[in-house]
């Protein structure tokens, strides 16, 4: 998923998946933490990167049934 908004500030990149971390005045800070928990429970991974020229891209990988990370 990608957007072209203001993006994630550099200092926030390392904390964006932490429980209770939010940059929103009304946010609970649980959404991305829950996403990470679900994806990792299925042996996947999730990460965030800048979108060019602006915005953010969220990447995630889920393995096919029976696959392992070593298989590629």
Image (tube, rainbow, N blue to C red):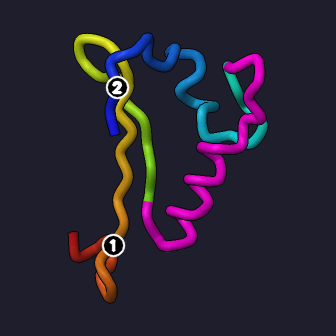
Is disc 1 placed on a helix, strand or loop?
Answer: loop
Q: Nearer the viewer, residue 43 or 38?
A: 38
Is disc 2 placed on a helix, strand or loop?
Answer: loop
Residue drawn at 76 percent across, 17 percent down: 25
Name the quarter where the C terminus is drawn: bottom left
| Residue 51 in picture, x, y percent from top left | 29, 22
Name the quarter where the N terminus is drawn: top left
Residue drawn at 63 percent across, 31 percent down: 15
Q: Is residue 49 left or right of residue 39?
A: left
Q: What is the magenta range?
A: 24-44
Do tag 1 and tag 2 residues touch (Cβ < 8 Å)? no
Q: Is residue 61 magenta?
A: no
Residue beneath disc 1: 63
Residue found farthest to the front: 26
| Residue 26 in picture, x, y percent from top left | 77, 23
Q: Which mark is residue 3?
A: 2
Residue drawn at 32 percent across, 32 percent down: 2
Relative vertical location of residue 50 with respect to residue 48 in this rendering, above or below:
above
Relative vertical location of residue 20 with respect to residue 33 in this rendering, above or below:
above
Q: Is residue 66 left or right of residue 33?
A: left
Q: Which mark's residue is nearer the viewer, 1 or 2? A: 2
The quadrant holding residue 44 is bottom left
Residue density around tag 2, few if under 14, some if 14–19, many if 20 or more, within 10 Å: some
Q: Is residue 16 left or right of residue 48?
A: right
């Amino acid at each position: 998923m990608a957007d072209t908004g203001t993006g994630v500030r550099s200092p926030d990149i390392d904390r964006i998946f932490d429980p209770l971390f939010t940059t929103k005045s009304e946010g609970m800070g649980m959404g991305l933490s829950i996403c990470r928990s679900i994806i990792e429970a299925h042996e996947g991974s999730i990460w965030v990167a800048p979108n060019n020229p602006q915005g953010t891209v969220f990447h995630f990988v889920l393995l096919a049934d029976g696959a392992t990370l070593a298989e590629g």
